Image (spheres, helix red, strand yellow):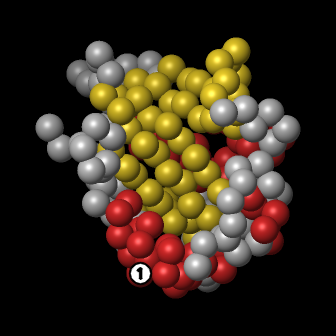
Amino acid sequence: MPWPRAVRLKSDRLVLEPLMIGHADEMVNVLAPRVLYRFTGGEPPSTEELWERYARQVRGQSEDGTAGWLNWITRRRDGGPPIGFVQATLHRAVEGMTADLAWLVTPSAQGHGFATEAAQQVAMWLHSIHVQELNALIHPEHEASARVARRVGMRSTTVSHDGEVLWRKRLVAMDTR
């Protein structure tokens, strides 16, 4: 069974565009500030590295097909350059699917609720395609990401992985009558 594909999403202030390889040229600036890697580690990617990464991600699934990949580039609805991204990695479960969420907003656009708005929009869409559970791994000191997770309806758990805390939200099945 094929994995769902990302679709264009809109919220009050944002447009979430399905990832394309060509987004690499714009996203290199979004991902350039080193402060973004304080909790996750790593270095800002080069344009070439982003082209390679996005070429893999736009396939929409892992090489072995066991995970689906959905990626959106976030922009203000009134136009302009990207301000971030949202990712959802899908896994098949006994009933339906689960999604591991991640979000990022470049520092110059932080503090305005954009990460929350984008993550909520993706969460609503995932619910509409029958995803049963949302998960996010968040560094225990990353208060901004914890606030986003809370606003999306996630709760922290006692489970940790590589020093990050698992946040989770179980989604209620939608009435399809």
The answer to whether residue 82 of the structure is visible from this angle is no
Near-viewer residue (19 or 55): 55
Query: Can you say whether 47 is above or below 114 in the image?
Result: below
Residue in the image at 58% along x and 79% along y: 46
Residue 137 sits in quarter: top right
Asked if residue 123 lies left or right of residue 58, the reply is: right
Picture quadrant of residue 107? bottom right
Q: Is residue 122 above or below residue 166?
A: below
> Measured from the top left, where is residue 100 in percent x and y?
50, 37
Q: Residue at x 69, y 66 (%)?
A: 43
Q: Residues within 10 Å of mark 1 (few under 14, many from 20)?
A: few
Residue in view at x 14 percent, y 38 percent = 1
Q: Which residue is mark 1?
A: 22
Give the total of numbered labels. Answer: 1
Q: Position of residue 173 (x, y in %)?
A: 37, 20
The answer to whether residue 104 is visible is: yes
Kindly indicate the quadrant of the structure image that contains residue 95: top left
Name the kind of residue labelled 1 in the image.
Gly
As drawn, is 113 to the left or to the right of 132? Answer: right
- Secondary element at image label 1: helix
Left or right? Give the position of 18 relative to 35: left
The residue closer to the viewer here, 14 or 46, is 46
- Where residue 71 appears, x then y in whole percent? 44, 57
**Going by the image, does 25 lie left or right of 21?**
right
Which quarter of the image is occupied by the C terminus?
top left
| Residue nearest the viewer, comparing 70 with 44 | 44
Q: Residue furthest left?
A: 1
**Residue 146 coordinates in the image, percent (x, y):** 76, 36
